[in-house]
Image: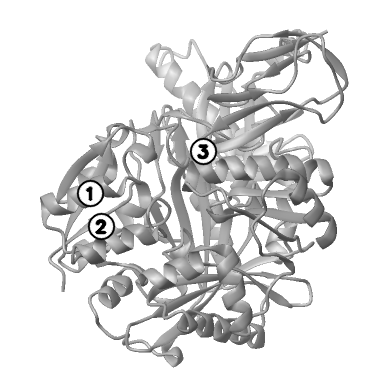
Amino acid sequence: MFDKILIANRGEIACRVIKTARKMGIKTVAIYSDADKHALHVEMADEAVHIGPPPANQSYIVIDKVMDAIRQTGAQAVHPGYGFLSENPKFAEALEAAGVAFIGPPVKAIEAMGDKITSKKIAQEAGVSTVPGYMGLIEDAEEAVKISNEIGYPVMIKASAGGGGKGMRIAWNDTEAREGFQSSKNEAANSFGDDRIFIEKFVTQPRHIEIQVLCDAHGNGIYLNERECSIQRRNQKVVEEAPSPFLDEATRKAMGDQSVALAKAVGYTSAGTVEFIVDGDRNFYFLEMNTRLQVEHPVTELITGVDLVEQMIRVANGEPLTITQDDVKINGWAIENRLYAEDPYRGFLPSIGRLTRYRPPAEGPLGDGIVRNDTGVFEGGEISMYYDPMIAKLCTWGPDRATAIETMRNALDSFEVEGIGHNLPFVAAVMDHPKFISGDMTTAFIAEEYPEGFEGVTLGDAALRNIAAACAAMNRVAEIRRARISGTLDNHERRVGEDWNVALQGVDFNVTIAADHDGSTVRFADGAEIRVSGDWTPGDQLARMTVNGTPLVMKVGKVSGGFRIRSRGAELKVHVRTPRQAELARLMPEKVPADTSKMLLCPMPGLIVKIDVAEGDEVQEGQALCTVEAMKMENILRAERKGVVSKINAAAGDSLAVDDVIMEFE
């Protein structure tokens, strides 16, 4: 077995590999850029080597710098994680030439499957079902439009060397095909150094289901069931689960058998993933093969008990698989939510900054389930503009899907993140969405269910009453503490009343609190009663309450006269007032926000790539105004309505902050 391995990556996946290597008694080497000097993976590794400036194309994906780090440390093998150099055949060749083991597949398999055009041809030859499309190289936007018309809209424009949602666009007409081709080409060049593009038919109402395969160098190959990855935004997965709530055993076996056949056809070894799109009739079509470990591998590990990183290391060491297909079972259900530094209220645009508070839920048992959190950050750390905005992968396991979902709901409510925009409210909303609960979702889930964007969660009456009751009880605790601090409780100069008004989400509840040693009974004006207990004390930022015997976890912040609450995806201001205070509060005027309707604001920190209009131009609804690049993704900002450009405040090459004014309209 290897004595020392180098992880050619960063963030949570580097930390994940280090954990398994440590369990196996293998020493680890981390590499880091200037931006990652104090990163978690650097702290966890036995050694660390600096490799350059923050941009990945000057550090993490510079093969010579990584090879130099290997020589410095004497590492015998390299795990590439995912992204960066994980599917770069030149890197695998350089390792082979240096006599260093690559913890991944052979070079020929990477070349064959890493190129989407070549991989589709091989898949067809191997008898794998594929999507109709144009596999040749496309020279320019006009040819892209011509091919799109021949295939028939909608089409998917893809970077041949792409991955992670980069270099991908859906086009429904000629204009979108023309624009999408250029944006995909630019993103592909920036992210992968390869701007080749191909086009295929976009299957409507698709589900994204993938098969995990594991092969050794001795001719053995197995599949470890499937993962459902249909909930995506901008072609990037957000929620994954294993198994899929849609597949039956016959379809699972057919997809698994084809996946293993494809892997063997290219001499594949190590862990890999074959991705499919599946229609409503369970017809499945090959999408691509990822010749690396997937981001969502933990859900497979949770239902099979197989440590995929360990298996990759053992295969790279020349060992045969000790697991047969008959050994692979499905034990329970697992769900993964990707926690991203992005603002769901602004179209999931990236957010950067310092994590002023980062308190994930404890890993291990939670109720009837289990919590796992794969992360690469820490409180006080910084989310950089240079890399993927993923903060953590929160995973839960349960003996069945309902338990896994309920465990995830409680884990999400317990997750504390402050200092940056994040998608916790959104993924919490998904966990309560009827379509997700029923398992009836497609890759169009976000577009269909949130057509105007995510605007937060509106809670029903029962949930509002539970939160209102909990906040009334918490307010009573805070009032007693304030009275004691002022020294007025014992001499009865100040008495904590029993009657309160709780206002939240535009609703008022008049309640009466009857407290005892075990908790409080909160009576509503209509006679309903809710029993509340818990050990919350003022200053705690997480309240773990029990409401009518059911756990209720709330993220708690302070606002004047009440609390700022986050629970089940809802962000609420809860005001708890005396009846007289509530009466007076209704007379107070509301503060009206500034009017920015005639301005185009920068939605995230980024770089202006180009300005598409000039001062004095008349623009139409949907017309492209400018392109902003952030975290390697190009974002085209479009006009929301017809108007005339009166002033342009930015130019190509400018770096802007959130809400900087790009242009103004008459």
Which quarter of the figure is the C terminus placed in?
Answer: top right
Residue bearing the label numbered 2: 18
Residue 154 tag number: none
Name the mark on residue 632: 3
Q: Where's the N terminus, which quadrant? A: bottom left
The residue labelled by disc 1 is 30
- 465 sits to left or right of 606: right
Q: Does 145 sit above or below residue 79? A: above
Please indicate, yes or no, whether residue 254 appears anywhere in the rendered image: yes
Q: Give the image quarter of residue 229.
A: bottom right
- Amino acid of disc 3: Lys
Judged from the image, the secondary structure of the residue bearing numbered disc 2 is helix
- Residue 444 in view here: no
**x then y, percent, for residue 513:** 61, 33
Q: Nearer the viewer, residue 273 or 524?
A: 273
Question: Please, which colouring scheme is shown?
Answer: one colour
Q: Secondary structure at mark 3?
A: loop
Q: Quadrant of residue 597?
A: top right
Q: Residues within 10 Å of mark 2 (few under 14, many from 20)?
A: many
Query: Within 10 Å of the Cα at label 1, are there few (<14), some (14-19), or many (20+) other Cα atoms?
Result: many
State left or right for residue 449 relative to residue 386. Answer: right
Secondary structure beneath dot 1 equals: strand
